[in-house]
Image (cartoon, helix red, strand yellow):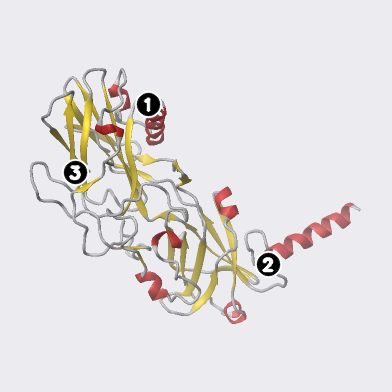
Amino acid sequence: MKIELRVIGLMFIVLLLAACSKDGESPEGTQPVINIYVYSPNNPTVTRGDVGNVDPINNDLNESLITSLQIWVFKHGTEELVSYYQPETVRNLNEDKGVTYQLIVSDDFSKADPKPNVDVYVVANAASCGLSSLGKSTTRTALEDAKIGSAYFGLSPLTDKVPEAGLPMSGVLRDVAVTGMAPVFKISSVTLTRTVSKLRFIFSRDDGNTVKITSIKLGAIADSENTLFQIPTEEYIFLKADHSLYNIGSTYEAGGTELLPDDSPLREDINWNEDPLKYAYQSGQNAQDYEDLIALGLSEDKLSGVGPYYLRESDKKLSGVITYQKGNAEETMKATFEMKAAGDFSRNHTWIIYAYYGVDGMQVVTVYSQNWTEVTSESHDVYNW
């Protein structure tokens, strides 16, 4: 009886390896396939200067939510499609860190010796950025040229919640080898990355006078009617082959966009706590610990928040102006905020601007990190990182 069970188990394993996975469904037969392991989106990187990684937040829908997935494999540098696959369900990818998908390939490709190198393109949640038309007939060139629609993740309208279809994500491998033996071949794993970045504003004050936030403008210049062009009108869904941090068009939306909603309670007062400095980023602090601290402060009404806003990536050094009033004074005051360097808002980054009002007025600190252990901190008019 034990021998019979082992034989049955072995046959079951062989069938699984030979089948083309459909997130739990397997077709009959032993058609040759390519195994591709797809990782769910990696954690967003905190700017400034990549302080560390943080977990996605639940903003009505989770920032890691995947509602659709498409995989294309082409012979490298050509329009010859090796395989295309769109699973009927992506439940497993939402439940696990990664899933192995098996894509059927032709007998000719299976018998080719040596195998040609291939280009692999993966898109998740295409409907969330105007790319619903992508499909099996989409060419490699069309994928390289595919862009997030101009109506998505820009300054007008602002996207302050995760779309029902999820945030757009992509991953690409170019000129990679196909390994393994028939009927199961293998390709390097692909990691999905969110193609947009996130911007949040956090405020607090001590227990003194009320502080009203009257305006938060991205791309504004203090005491000037001029504005800066910082958010591109176009962003490509895939990064370039030269390993650039971003892939955008050459035109930009006009700056000066108001980010503070008309009905925001911050227009009346910002939340106060006994120690606003407690929520300022400390040099060397773990990025996730800081994100958790901010989340706790918001949940306890010790902090006030605006956003998050999901925006197309940018190669510019984002900046802007916060306008506020102290107590019942009619006079308004301004504090500027800016990133440390151009490129800090490339895709899959998150930027928190923390501004607090204390005895010395509105305060801000910029934090720059080249890696997890090398961090420098600079004091300015407003906290931002």
Q: Amino acid at mark 2?
A: Ala
Q: Amino acid at mark 1?
A: Asp
**Circle 3 sits on which residue?**
320
**Circle 1 sits on which residue?**
301
**Depth order, front residue of 22/165:** 165
Q: Please tell me whether residue 319 is drawn above or below residue 304 in the rendered image.
A: below
Q: Taking 222 as reference, is 268 left or right?
A: right
| Disc 1 packing (10 Å; few <14; some 14–19; many ≥20) | some
Of circles 3 and 2, which is in front?
3
**Circle 2 sits on which residue?**
19
Q: Amino acid at mark 3?
A: Gly
| Disc 3 packing (10 Å; few <14; some 14–19; many ≥20) | many
Mark 1: which secondary structure?
A: loop
Q: Report, in whole angstroms, how far the alpha carbon at label 1 lies from the one at label 2.
A: 53 Å
Q: Residue at x 43, y 54 (%)?
A: 167
Q: Please tell me whether residue 60 is drawn above or below residue 380 in the rendered image.
A: below
Whichever of callouts 1 and 2 sits on the residue coming sooner in the sequence is: 2
